[in-house]
């Protein structure tokens, strides 16, 4: 298998390089054709790497970057003020062809702004979108946008639908069913942008557009790709995470109410844990930025080692599927 | 205790009068000071009432209405074309002072349109909002709007915040913490309407405004009143219902995987069922329309007898608290 080179922004995330470096090195052992470039403060990264036994340094480079973008830094400030930030240098490795994908657990807004600036969007795409696979009763669906674009026109929603469909196909779903998230399934329902986007999607050839979907239909698994603006998508994702977490806690509390319930609880605990991981996909697997001339995966800021490794795996799949190239090819046919 | 008279649209909902009539009559037995007016096709209603033993007909009237609004009828059509619809006649009983509240399980859009037309909004309120109590890790929060208004200006969001706070107070929460639902908690986050609404709320005296809240914060119980436009609120509510239902089913499936798990599952089933009821409050308890010159409770279309009874109980509380009057008094101080 051909080598895949992934640039890692080693300085981002709530836990920083102490979490990211070991997680990245673990992926080297898992994928023999994987090469990594760790980007960040070289002395610190060298020290962290040196602590890990049996690292294959042939497949691990360290690229120095002197600056770090803080998790709460404004995107505009990150864009203008930090030319040598680890996140930016990692993206530049992708632009220069030295890496095929970038993975970062850093500031989402800054990563989106820098990705657009450094890599540029694909022809025909105004704005990249964030997508992640959400669990449903029938498997999973790809939900976008997850928060990169709080205000969206009908054309933006249309572009998200096209990108989501191509990505779902690349990730293994044949003729993905594409739906627009709405407050009802009748034609008269929804705001102006959603109604106009529905008109555009009905006319799109080669797209398996199935109409409107409601919040409960999404979790029933009625569609493979669900499209909404980033305000709605972000609130849906975070409220779902919050609800799943509340349900787990409530179950544990219920299981502690009586001795009988406690015994049941001890037995049920492994099942509950498994469910919790399944139900927080973005926290666990990260999100992909679609519509860029390059692959960028955002690992959740609060993701631990497992989560960061999942993000690297997602990057590897997109590299192997050559997702930006596939998107580019399909967009020429599907975009207006 | 003074008598409370509630008008029941007996013809609405997915199950119609065969569900609504027995549910209503059951409430008469529960609340000795409750009087009901069942509105709909009198011969049918008389027949259904006659089948129930020991009905206190002193406290139960039947008001004939010849027309029924279908669940999928357009609101504009319902408004213009059906002057003698059960829903409309029930609302007119409230306007004429013959009843103090109206409960309907019928078409939500039609109920909102007719409520506005028949009862009118309170001075200073442009649009009524739908509110329901959502379970959180710390109890519950009042979420509005749940879908009555898909496009909202900053002023509308501000009005919803004021109404939500007054309703939460009336229902027993002292100095309710009011938050705006957003994609982040920093000032720069959000769309234009949300940012402008935040400005208005920061200046409002007598309102315990605590700032932005994210989807996960809502379920953590970080606020007592959470405000958003009806598009976002409806999608949050329905996706939460869908997710809760998916988790229950997934738990049951996990509990069936092995004999050991199956035994655990049998023991856990009552806990799971209790949780499912807790987690679908709008389906169970209905939603209240706030901002009208009268009390209107929307019972979920698919609610069974228990759900319809919960909606009647909610109406009774609002009657006892004289919610529209309280709202009117506070709005004069709080609205711009």
Image (spheres, coloured by chain):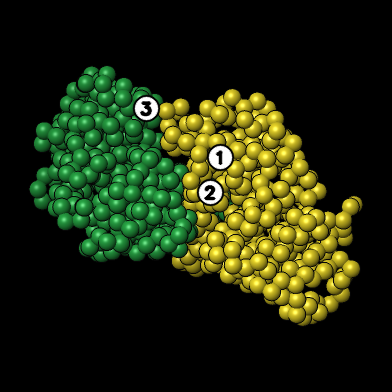
Chain colours: A green, B yellow
Q: Are marks 1 and 2 in contact (CB under 8 Å)?
A: yes
Judging from the image, what secondary structure is the residue with disc 1 in?
Answer: helix
Position of residue A68 measured from the top left corner of the image (x, y, whole percent): 29, 22
Image mark 2: chain: B
Please give the residue where the numbered disc 1 appears in the rendered image.
Answer: B156
Could you tell me how far apart the alpha carbons at marks 3 and 1 are, in whole angstroms? 33 Å
Q: Chain of mark 3?
A: A
- Answer few, some or many: residues within 10 Å of disc 2's Cα (few below 14, many 20 plus, some between 14 and 19): many
Nearer to us in this view, B256 or A40? A40
Image quadrant where residue B14 sits: bottom right
The quarter holding residue B189 reads top left
Measured as percent of width and height from the top left, residue A220 is found at 44, 62
On the same chain, marks 3 and 2? The answer is no
Q: Residues within 10 Å of mark 3 (few under 14, many from 20)?
A: some
Q: Are marks 3 and 1 on the same chain?
A: no
Q: Is residue B246 above or below residue A77?
A: below
Q: Which of the labelled discs sits on residue B149, or is there none?
A: 2
Say which residue appears at 35% left-offset and 53% top-offset.
A196
Say which element carries label 3. loop
Which of the pair A172/A268 is nearer the observer? A172
Who's the residue at 55% across and 43% down the image? B219
CA distance for labels 3 and 2: 35 Å
Between discs 1 and 2, the one toward the N terminus: 2
Q: Are marks 1 and 2 on the same chain?
A: yes
Camera-near label (3 vs 2) is 2
User: Which residue is found at the position 66% from the left and 31% from the top?
Assistant: B334
Q: Residue at x 61, y 35 (%)?
A: B178
Q: Secondary structure at mark 2?
A: loop
Q: How many marks?
A: 3
Residue A252 placement, left or right of B24: left
Pointer 3: what residue?
A: A71
- Residue A92 in sight from this viewpoint: yes
């Amino acid at each position: 298998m051909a080598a895949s080179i992934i640039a890692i922004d080693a300085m981002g995330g709530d836990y920083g390089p102490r979490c990211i470096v070991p997680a990245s090195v673990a992926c080297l052992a898992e994928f023999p054709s994987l090469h990594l470039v760790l980007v960040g403060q070289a002395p610190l990264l060298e020290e962290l790497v040196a602590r890990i036994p049996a690292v294959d340094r042939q497949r691990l480079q360290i690229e120095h970057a002197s600056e770090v973008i803080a998790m709460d830094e404004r995107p505009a400030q990150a864009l203008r003020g930090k030319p040598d930030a680890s996140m930016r240098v990692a993206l530049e490795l992708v632009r220069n062809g030295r890496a095929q994908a970038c993975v970062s657990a850093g500031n989402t807004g800054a990563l989106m702004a820098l990705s657009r600036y450094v890599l540029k969007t694909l022809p025909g795409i105004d704005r990249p979108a964030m997508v992640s696979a959400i669990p449903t009763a029938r498997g999973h669906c790809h939900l976008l946008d997850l928060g990169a674009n709080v205000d969206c026109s009908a054309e933006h929603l249309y572009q998200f639908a096209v990108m989501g469909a191509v990505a779902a196909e690349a990730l293994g779903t044949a003729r993905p069913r594409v739906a627009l998230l709405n407050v009802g399934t009748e034609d008269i329902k929804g705001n102006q942008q959603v109604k106009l986007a529905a008109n555009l999607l009905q006319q799109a050839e080669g797209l398996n557009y199935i109409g409107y979907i409601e919040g409960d239909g999404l979790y029933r698994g009625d569609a493979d790709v669900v499209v909404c603006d980033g305000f709605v998508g972000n609130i849906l994702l975070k409220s779902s995470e919050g609800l799943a977490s509340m349900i787990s806690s409530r179950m544990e509390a219920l299981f502690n109410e009586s001795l009988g319930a406690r015994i049941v609880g001890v037995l049920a605990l492994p099942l509950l844990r498994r469910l919790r991981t399944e139900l927080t996909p973005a926290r666990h697997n990260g999100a992909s930025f679609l519509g860029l001339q390059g692959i960028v995966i955002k690992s959740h800021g609060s993701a631990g080692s497992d989560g960061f490794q999942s993000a690297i795996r997602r990057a590897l799949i997109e590299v192997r599927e050559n997702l930006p190239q596939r998107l580019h090819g399909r967009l020429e046919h599907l975009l207006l």
